[in-house]
Amino acid sequence: MAVIRIEKLIPSSGADPTEGYDSASPVGFTQWEPDDEARFSVVVPETYVGGSNVLLKLHESTPSVTGRHAWQLSTLLVRPDVHVTAQQAPAETVSGEYEAAPVADRLTIRTLAATGATGAGLVADTSIQPGDYLSFVLKRLPASSEEDPNSIKVFAISLDIVMDETAVSDCPGRIGRIIDTVRDLFNESGGDFLSDQFILRSVNRCLQELAQDDYWRTESWIPSVAGTNRIDLLAAIPRFQDVHQVRFSGRTNPMVPLGGYKEYDDLRTASNSSGVPECYTVQNTSLFVWPPPQESLAEGFCIYHSYLPADLTCGEESADPPVPRAHDMVFVYYVLRQAFLRDRHAPGADLKFQEYSALYDREKQKLLSEGDPPGLSLRPYR
């Protein structure tokens, strides 16, 4: 169990709680009147254990010994890669009513189940996943009777989240979970044989193999130069893999792909007058067009192409593979295949290599058959 301390409250649509300091100590608190409300949010940690609930804890006090008060907590789940409005996002609301402590100003902990109204580890009917955003609105409600007339002082707000305590890798994000899963399946508790560096190198080789299968595709606009037939694709799109379609600026229909360089050379030999480019071919890393464009444009050609993503690292900015989270096992199986290839002289290593090769091939086909590759953009790839 991990405790996430909420350090900052954000104004909501209702009245805001006020801030103050305890007269007997320098401890700060927020004062809540009935109908005061505030927002806060957290990112679900990568080590969150699926199927477990999130609990809210309030450390509060009141000078009253007889009054009652109530709290309401509304929870909203936002998935970073799913674009929905607040009205469409999964949400649920819980409330609880409490009696004042029998001793005035005694610090008391109140607990509310922030999730799980419809099932463990769910917000509404959606399961919580690492990387999700959980947004909360906390509100003090009037009690059903004997309302406490005093402000409720809240000294601390925290969330209890169940975490996996067995993580070994120091890498953050999904890459850290991939590394730990590899070690679990390889039956290695430390990093003596399978270091983070070896696993990262293997994961990035897997990225290269998926790129060769044209998994990642996008559109990039590149310049046209008047009278020029040849374009250096590596200079224009450094991480391109294969060209699938070319359109010239202002033209609705794509250019016609030629059968090869000889066909292009025959057209160029017959006539190489400038005009609107109609045909193209790719040889090695060069794009050849015919006829050559008659004008120079900053965004002359729209290239629909596959590409190789940037390498994954242990840095915060590049620790998540550019595939849906559900397919992270494709990297696990690839690394295990490489691990048993590296350990090929060990007893049974050849059978394990074949087993994980088959699992990798099956998982890769599931990934590649998901439909149109992700990442389509109308702006240049960078």
Image (tube, helix red, strand yellow):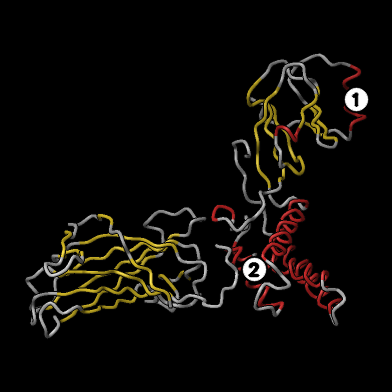
Q: Which mark is residue 265?
A: 1
Pointer 1 or 2: first along the chain: 2
Few, some or many residues within 10 Å of mark 2 (<14, 14–19, 20+): many
Q: Is residue 201 left or right of residue 298?
A: right
Near-viewer residue (98 or 30): 30
Q: Residue at x 26, y 65 (%)?
A: 138
Where, quadrant-wise, is the C terminus in this rendering?
top right
- Where on the picture, by quarter, is residue 69? bottom left
Residue 176 screen position, x and y as percent: 59, 66
| Front: mark 1 or 2 | 2
Marks 1/2 in contact by CB < 8 Å: the verdict is: no
Q: Quadrant of the N terminus?
A: bottom left
Residue 206 sits above or below residue 5 on the image: above
Residue with the most extreme top position: 273
Q: Which residue is mark 2?
A: 179
Residue shown at 68%/18% (left/top)? Answer: 296
Kindly report the distance in space between the C-alpha atoms of the residues bearing marks 1 and 2: 50 Å
85 over 99 or under it: above or below? above
Q: Looking at the image, is 241 positioned above or below residue 184? A: above
Q: What SS does tag 2 mark? A: helix
Most distant residue in the bottom direction = 102
Tell me where residue 373 appears, x and y as whole percent.
67, 51
Q: Amino acid at mark 1?
A: Asp
Q: Which element type, helix, strand or loop, lies under badge 1?
A: helix
Q: Residue at x 31, y 66 (%)?
A: 74
Please state the horizontal and vertical placement of residue 192, each as a whole percent of the image. Answer: 70, 73
Image spot of residue 186 (x, y percent): 72, 77
* Residue 283 vertical position relative to residue 45 in the rendered view, above or below: above
Q: How many marks?
A: 2
Q: Amino acid at mark 2?
A: Ile
Quarter residue 281 falls in: top right
The disc placed on residue 360 is: none
